[in-house]
Image: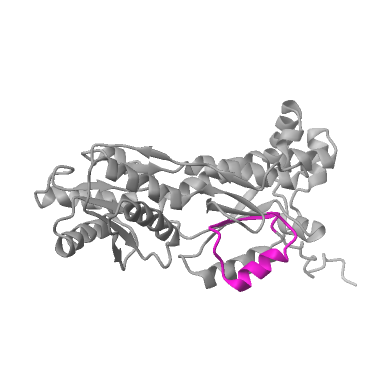
């Protein structure tokens, strides 16, 4: 054999085999591997000094935990699925914020899904997320397809339904939309408005707006009045609110107050009223729902129902964490309530 150095290629290092391990992080921090795991997954269970050493070692070594491998080994994960109807709506973004802050503080991350108000898409998302061995699931609303309900009922992990109040699958944090509709209708009657129209948008999908209309309708009928309804074929937006105002003026020209299904519609109508020379509330009163920031920044300020969205997310997150930590949950259902905010628009 030649004395020359062999020209045969050396064995290739397997890709990713040089990644730092949990054991190496533990050795660098001077703790056990289980302490590293706790510091990363349940930081509240580790004292500040130890957690700081672990995180410093994680950063220096560039350690990234293999979450997929962990979930396969334990048939569980540090993920919690959150499914909402829209990511373009500030209402759901604020609920997600409350959930995310609560979960991340306790070592969990969220997997986020958007249904676009489609129950079939919701069912597909549920199937996908359950396949990822999520520790729990948060889903908006109490109405789901039959197939989705069966799937969730057979899943032996926490399910939290948010946004509305009622008989749920497991845990529930929300508010009474029917009573919210009643509250606004009573306010308008107390202000002596007598020709009132409710304007909603795509209420077959946004059925909670339909629940508020049911409450609104009941109060008006109790007062001996008919409840007029206009349903737009587009989701709530400033532009849709302008269309809603024009439609009301065309179909019900003697209207003295409009109860909009949400603040986006109401604010859009208020701005449009100013453009066409209508005085709010002298010519027509306008009210909304949700308590979005835009309602405080238009002139006149918007009368609305404020829902505690971020607080709803935090409370929902806290209840799920109790269940995951095997702590008693005193009641499966929590009513976060709402508040009537009276602005100058009524």
Query: Could you tell whether 242 is left or right of 16 in the image?
Result: left
Residue 121 part of the magenta segment: no
| Residue displayed at 27% across by 38% down | 297
**Residue at the top extreme of this rendering:** 49
Considering depth in this image, is 62 or 344 the residue closer to the camera? 344
| Residue displayed at 13% across by 47% down | 283
Considering depth in this image, is 104 or 118 the residue closer to the camera? 118
Residue interval drawn in magenta: 134-158
Residue 138 part of the magenta segment: yes
Q: Residue 307: where, in percent of width, then height?
A: 44, 43
Query: Could you tell whether 72 is left or right of 237 in the image?
Result: right
Q: Quadrant of the N terminus?
A: bottom right
| Residue displayed at 17% across by 48% down | 284
Q: Is residue 17 visible?
A: no
| Quadrant assignment, res 345 | top left
Q: Quadrant of the C terminus?
A: top left
**Residue at the right extreme of this rendering:** 1
Q: Is residue 59 visible?
A: yes
| Residue displayed at 57% across by 71% down | 145
Q: Residue 139: where, in percent of width, then height?
A: 57, 57
Query: Could you tell whether 9 is left or right of 182 in the image?
Result: right
Q: Is residue 27 above or below residue 93?
A: above
């Amino acid at each position: 054999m030649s004395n020359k150095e062999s020209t045969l290629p050396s064995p290739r290092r397997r890709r990713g085999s040089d990644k730092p391990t949990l054991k190496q992080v533990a050795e660098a921090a001077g703790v056990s591997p289980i302490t590293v795991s706790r510091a990363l997954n349940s930081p509240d269970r580790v004292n500040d000094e130890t957690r700081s050493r672990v995180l410093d070692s994680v950063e220096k070594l560039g350690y990234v935990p293999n979450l997929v491998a962990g979930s396969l080994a334990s048939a569980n994960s540090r993920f919690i699925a959150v499914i909402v109807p829209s990511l373009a709506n500030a209402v759901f973004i604020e609920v997600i914020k409350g959930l995310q802050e609560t979960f991340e503080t306790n070592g969990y991350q969220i997997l986020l899904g958007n249904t676009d108000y489609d129950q079939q898409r919701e069912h597909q998302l549920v199937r996908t997320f359950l396949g990822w061995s999520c520790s729990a699931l948060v889903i908006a609303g109490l109405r789901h397809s039959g197939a989705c309900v069966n799937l969730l009922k057979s899943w032996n992990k926490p399910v939290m339904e948010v946004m509305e109040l009622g008989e749920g699958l497991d845990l529930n944090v929300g508010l009474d939309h029917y009573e919210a509709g009643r509250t606004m209708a009573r306010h308008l009657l107390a202000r002596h408005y007598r020709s009132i129209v409710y304007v909603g948008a795509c209420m077959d999908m946004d059925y909670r707006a339909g629940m508020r209309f049911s409450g609104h309708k009941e109060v008006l009928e109790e007062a001996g009045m008919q409840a007029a309804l206009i349903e737009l074929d587009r989701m709530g937006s400033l532009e849709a609110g302008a269309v809603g105002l024009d439609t009301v003026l065309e179909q019900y020209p003697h209207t003295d107050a409009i109860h909009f299904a949400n603040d986006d519609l109401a604010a859009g109508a208020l701005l449009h009223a100013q453009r066409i020379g209508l005085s709010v509330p002298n010519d027509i009163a306008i009210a909304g729902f949700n308590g979005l920031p835009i309602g405080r920044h238009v002139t006149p300020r918007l009368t609305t129902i404020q829902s505690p969205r971020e607080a709803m997310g935090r409370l929902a997150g806290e209840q799920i964490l109790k269940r995951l930590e095997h702590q008693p949950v005193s009641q499966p259902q929590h009513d976060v309530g709402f508040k009537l905010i009276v602005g100058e628009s009524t």
